[in-house]
Image (cartoon, rainbow, N blue to C red):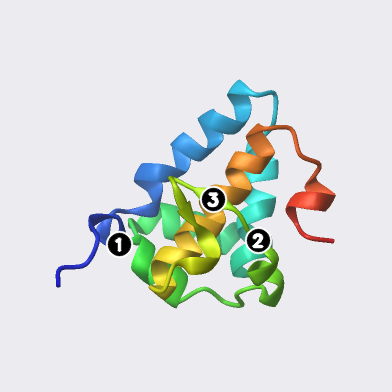
Amino acid sequence: MAEHKIYSMSVNSVYPHYINKAERKGRTKEEVDEIIFWLTGYDEAGLNHVLESGTDFKTFFKEAPRMNENRTLIKGVICGVRIEEIEEEIMREIRYLDKMVDELARGKSMEKILRH
């Protein structure tokens, strides 16, 4: 079975959409970055390298410095699919990120988004 096309998409092709979604709802790029840092363990320099080098989503998650163990607390439906039922690891990681950015755009506090 062929891999989903999002796996080969560059993070830098989707990242601006995360930023735009957040900013349209009065949130900031810094908050989106904080979500990414929390989820993946990347820091600002690491994220900038990923964006500049055209790293794809599969590599982005496979090479993440430290996936946050509390990411499994992220529950719910994204794109009509319950996150906790997604079996493919990389797809689940992508959907965790999507869900967190959605929560940001819906006005949820960073404390709740980051599962404190």
The kind of residue tagged 3 is Val
Q: Hey, which residue is sitting farthest left in the picture? A: 1
Q: Is residue 18 above or below residue 81?
A: above
Residue denoted by label 3: 77
Neighbour tally class for label 1: few under 14, some 14-19, many 20 plus, Cα within 10 Å: some
- SS class of the residue under badge 2? loop
Q: For this rendering, which residue is in front, 114 or 66?
A: 114
Find out whether the residues at labels 2 and 3 contact each other: C-beta distance under 8 Å.
no
Residue found 39% across the figure and 47% down from its top = 12
Q: Which secondary structure, mark 1?
A: helix
Counting residues from the start of the chain, the first of labels 2 and 1 encountered is 1
- Say which element carries label 3: strand
Distance between mark 3 and mark 1 Cα atoms: 20 Å
> Left or right of 105: which side holds 13?
left
* Residue 101 visible, this angle: yes
Q: Is residue 43 visible?
A: no
Residue topped by disc 1? 7
Residue 74, labelled with which disc? 2
Is label 3 or label 1 in front? 3
Image position, residue 80 (x, y; %): 44, 46
Instruction: State the residue at coordinates (60%, 56%).
Output: 36
Quarter occupied by residue 65: bottom right
Q: Amino acid at mark 2?
A: Ile
In the image, 51 versus 80, the foreground residue is 80
Sort mark 2 into few (<14), some (14-19) or many (20+) by Cα contacts within 10 Å.
Answer: some
Q: Which mark is residue 61?
A: none
Q: Residue at x 61, y 26 (%)?
A: 23
Q: Does residue 27 lie above or below 35 as drawn?
A: above
Q: CA distance from mark 2 to mark 1?
A: 21 Å
| Mark nearer the viewer, 2 or 3 | 3
Measured as percent of width and height from the top left, residue 37 is found at: 65, 60
Residue 58: percent from left, percent from top:
35, 68
